[in-house]
Amino acid sequence: MPKNTPDVIRIKEVGAFGEYHVGSHSDPGKYHTVNLSERAGSGVCTCEYFQFTASKNYRLQYEAAVLAGEKKPRPFISYRKGRVGCTECKHIFYTREHFIKFRLRQLFETFANHPTPEQFSESLRVLTHWPK
């Protein structure tokens, strides 16, 4: 886990693929919803920091990239404690780490164990909760 990771992070996959409930560090009884598939894969969160700060930073970075003439602007500044201008919150950061550590590993294992396209596509459908 990254250096800034709290001792215990409560992350639970819910609903659609890429959607998680993440425990609040400041209020142990509260959960925030993180969806990693939103904002072109940058993710969104229901916490106050994301709603009022990170989302605004993302818009400012995006507008600056468009003005600079970038063809496919991907404004993204990773969360780090004390970093100014972050475009994500710590909930998105830790959920992405969780996704890489657990779900992505499952996808690679599934691919290795199901070499034919038919086998892999069915396994992928189950892993991503895609309806039949």
Image (cartoon, rainbow, N blue to C red):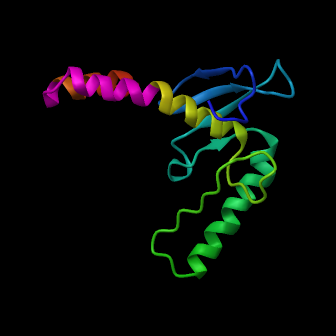
Up-down relation of residue 39 to residue 18 (above or below): below
Q: Residue at x 78, y 27 (%)?
A: 24
Q: Which residue is at 56% across, 49% downward?
A: 42
Quadrant position of residue 120: top left
Residue at point 56% right, 52% down?
39
Asked if residue 118 lies left or right of residue 79, the reply is left
> Residue 23: x percent and y percent?
73, 24
* Residue farthest to the front, as pictured: 3
Residue 20 vertical position relative to residue 44 in the rendered view, above or below: above
> Is 112 placed left or right of 76 in the picture?
left
Quarter holding the N terminus? top right
Image coordinates of residue 53 in percent, x first then y, are 79, 54
Q: Is residue 45 above or below residue 99?
A: below
Residue 36 in view, yes or no: yes
- Identify the magenta region: 103-118
**Residue 117 in which image quadrant:** top left
Q: Position of residue 31 (x, y in %)?
A: 74, 25
Q: Residue 63 magenta-drawn?
A: no
